[in-house]
Amino acid sequence: MEMTEQSFDFGVTPAALSSLYPRLYHMAHEDAWPQIQRHGLLSTRSILNLWEVETAQRARIEGEIRPAAVELTHPRHGKVVIRDQKPMNEKKLRSALIDCTPEDWCRLLNSKIFFWPCVDRLNTHMAARGNRGKTHLVLTLDSYRLVKSYEQQIALCAMNSGNTNPFPQRRGKSSFMRMSQYPFGARRKRGFYYTVVELAVDRDIPDILIFVLTADYMTSDGKVSRVVGDPFAKPGGGLSKRDGGNLTWPPGKMEISR
């Protein structure tokens, strides 16, 4: 078979992905750290299993857009908070879906664990209307080590799959692509910010702590409190499109409490 230039636009290795995105970021509820230490990172589906949520409540949490965060308690596992899905509008989502229903889409998202590949998208997510002014737990992870370990369970996405604002991008089950199928080369031409928008892992990550470089409590206005990691490392230490790769976190003043 003749190999054309286009043939090389598809697929990306852990080394190539982590060369462009050396850090991955996961934003969790501010109370999540004890449970992460105990269980690792769990998908919403796995949380519902572990917390033994009954059928009717589970159907609402897993199969409908969550307008507010949901707090669950368990006699053995304690408290956990499942985050809201306010950036999704059901009418807009329905109009954007190609091959599934809003319930299917919600269940699909709830089966995955999501990471931002660049600090700009983390900033945007933290500064969104529903998150602004709140404290969040942010894990900064070693991209290469995590991607190398979970390569077969990783899906890449070229959009913010949990957002329908300001307009709903067309989406479906094929929006999540394996690393071997992702058009990395073609999208690379669009620039750092647009090459990969989301990285998702299709299973729980019980050993997440071995990939964590720093864990910080952060707010959108730049206040940071270090939980784990080098006390002198910049929070979110990775690439930023704004300064061509020299991280500034966030735009404006930064305060670190230790």
Image (spheres, grey):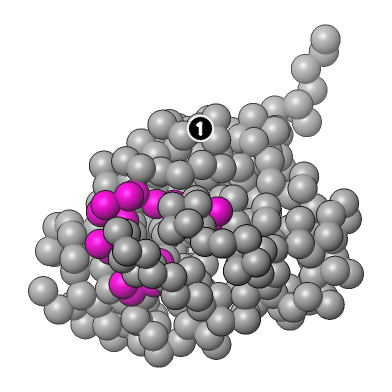
Give the residue drawn at x 19%, y 69%: 226
Q: Is residue 47 visible?
A: no
Q: Quadrant of residue 79?
A: bottom left
Q: Is residue 181 visible?
A: yes
Vertical position of residue 222 compared to residue 204: above or below: below
Left or right of residue 39: residue 44:
right
Q: Quadrant of the N terminus?
A: top right
Is 195 part of what is drawn in magenta?
A: no
Image spot of residue 4 (x, y percent): 79, 23
Image spot of residue 66 (x, y percent): 62, 75
Image spot of residue 210 (x, y percent): 26, 42
According to the image, label 1 marks what residue? 151
Give the residue drawn at x 33%, y 74%: 30
Left or right of residue 66: residue 216:
left
| Residue in the foreground of this view, choosing between 137 and 40 | 40
Point out the stretch of residues depicted in magenta: 28-45
| Residue in the foreground of this view, choosing between 160 and 12 | 160
